[in-house]
Amino acid sequence: MTTAISVKNLGKKYQIGAAETKFRYNMLRDVLVDTMFAPVRLAKALVGKSDRRVNQNFVWALKDVSFDLDEGKVLGIVGRNGAGKSTLLKILSRVTEPTEGTVSVRGRVGSLLEVGTGFHPELTGRENIYMNGAILGMKRNEIDRNFDAIVDFSEVNQFIDTPVKRYSSGMYLRLAFAVAAHLEPDILVVDEVLAVGDAEFQRKCIGKMNDVAQQGRTVLFVSHNMSAILRLTQEAIVLKKGQLIKRAPTPEAVDFYLASGQAESGERVWEADEIPAASAPFRPVAIKIKERSGAVVDTVRSTEPVVIEFEYQLDAPVTGLRVGMYLNTMRGEYVFTAFDTDDAKQYEQFGARAAGRYVSRCEIPADFFNEGRYYLGVNASSFGVKRYFMDENAISFNVDISGAPGTQWPEMRQGPIRPRLNWKIEKID
Amino acid sequence: MTELTKHKPTTIYIKPSKGLAALNLRDLWTYRELIFFMVWRDVKVKYKQTLLGMAWAVIQPVMTMLVFTFLFDKVAKLPTEGIPYPVFSFTALLPWGLFVVALNQGSRSLVAHNNMVTKIYFPRLILPMSSVFAGLVDFAIAFVILIALMFYYQVTPAWNLLWTLPLFLLLALITALGVALWLSAVNVKYRDVNQALPFLTQFWLFATPVAYSASVVSAKWQILYSLNPMAGVVNGFRWALLGAGNGPDITLWVSATISILIFVSGLFYFRSMEKTFADTI
């Protein structure tokens, strides 16, 4: 068997902190001092010596990653945000260079992370197909040959000579995906693209990926969606903090991933400079997504209850306070809004709260969520008086639906919730 | 999906590049169609949703020429070696227009296409190159106007020198591309370039004999003056088309040398910065 991808001791170092130090101006004085030193900075930059203290802040997004992948295999890559998945894909598709180590890639790499890159709103669908195809490295005769297939796949036939700025977002996305899908790469890289578009479109994407795999091409599939990984891949690697910590047949790797290595995500801690002065006396401290066992997690199982814990500080007594959350899907649809003092008795007891540190905790029951990623916003206010604090995107988490109702059928279910309903079937005739 | 690709897969080795990066011209050749499509897109999109459309390519240089004619011919009465001032200045506006496009579009090309840079691989050189080439379309249109102007003012072209025009056009392209390479690569990291561009363009225009004749610069300053590579290009255009000036002398060689230096150093600077573009943009 030929090796399609061979990765050896791959490492990628990123500089961080430059932006942080740059924008942390607290006083006008700092700004003025900084402006005064501008000529010095210019001189340093030109001779290639940038600021020392900035240079020392770096992080290894990938470190010592090695693996081989045979041609025609479908490999899943899992890991939480910042584990290095995207960096790995970017190196494989030559967008960025590694800091150390080597990769050899046999054949053309096509990726579905580049859907719609180079699309110009003023150009028609037809023109954009050629443009985008060229950007993805297709030859013109290759585009000619696949043109009809691309148009059919995208289902925008009658609008093909209309500028894409007149397209709906769905049409735009379908066309963009259609071009990328017909690149005929030897190695296909898929990164979470399945999270966008409607259910019918997602079904097509998965179909496409299966086609590609069945033609004996190599596929790398990155997703937070464990059921998709389980469905589509035979083998998976787990990345954690830039290191490859597990390679195993997919079910084993997914179990390993869900059971371990999750400790620090599922938690958001507010730094002092993230809290606007106007929110006083309310001060958010942290929000956590927990399993019932108490473990902080980034991915929850839909078949188990989820605990959401919001910790905050009141620097002065507040009356009429309600602390709550908004839950949104990835596409920005509201799932629900709820406050800790929604219950009248709770409000009597906690509407007026003395200064001090508090936790508002709630449990979302099992069999509630459908699969996907959800965004949680927080809000603290006194109704009709003042909104102390609001962060519409405080934290996000994934829901894994293994074992949820209906998972025996490999299909997407519409809607943000997936309840276990009490079905009765009677024969009445 | 129709059928399996017929090409034989080639193995690509990815590793950190050390020292001066090789130019990798083969890659550029593989992606030559992309250059064509980028230029085609730029031209196609440039005048979309404008009332006057392609007419802008005519209006812009003609208006500049009219303003120059009023200011420098009617008011300041600058010497033009016996050539009607509109033709004299328009001849210089041709390469200058090309250079301004390169300076402005070329320098912003990487940042303007940052979604391409951060998402896919292609030789990054394509971006500044195609914005410079896109300027050639406006150049061609302006050239037609120049011919019309020469007819109107009954200026005979310098037939015996006309064959040198492609060489000066090449020099103009090399200068424009060289400057675009430098500025676009610096712009990725330091957006100061965006702020400096309007000023730089204006300053450069005054330092180039577009509105006036290079002969107004006194002899002892000529060498210093020719350090501006655009001075050589503009003088060359006037000489090739109108027979104005002394023709190639030491100042032209100084200008041309500077152009080539800017271009070659720009190429290497660009290539050595290229690996960090996706991370810093």
Image (cartoon, rainbow, N blue to C red):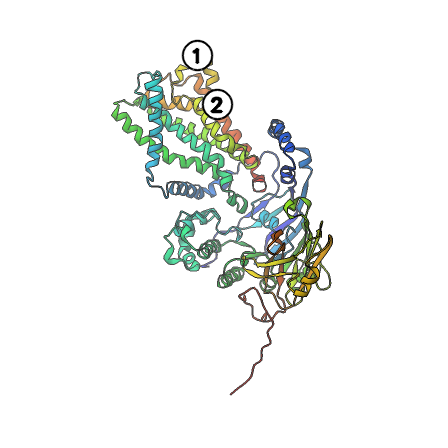
x and y percent of residue A257 in the render?
Answer: 68, 59
Q: Which residue in the structure is indicated by mark 2?
A: B257
Count of number-bearing discs: 2
Quick check: do tags 2 and 1 share a chain?
Answer: yes
Q: Does residue A197 sit above or below B243 in this rendering?
A: below
Return the disc, 2 or 1, that comes first in the chain's sequence: 1
Could you say which quadrant of the image residue A371 lies in? bottom right
How far separated are the C-alphas under marks 2 and 1?
20 Å
Judged left or right of residue A407, residue A312 is: right
At label 1, counting other C-alpha atoms closer than 10 Å, the crowd grade (few under 14, some 14-19, many 20 or more) is: few
* Residue A123 at x, y percent in the picture: 40, 48
Q: Amino acid at mark 1?
A: Ala
Residue B62: mark: none
Quickly name the residue at label 1: B219
Three-letter amino acid code at disc 2? Answer: Thr
Please name whichever residue, B116 or A104, is drawn nearer the observer in this view of the structure.
B116
* Circle 2 SS class: helix
Residue A301 against residue B90 in the figure, above or below:
below
Q: Are marks 2 and 1 in contact (CB under 8 Å)?
A: no
Mark toward the viewer: 2 or 1: 1
Whole-percent x, y for residue A168 in the image: 43, 55
Element marked by disc 1: helix
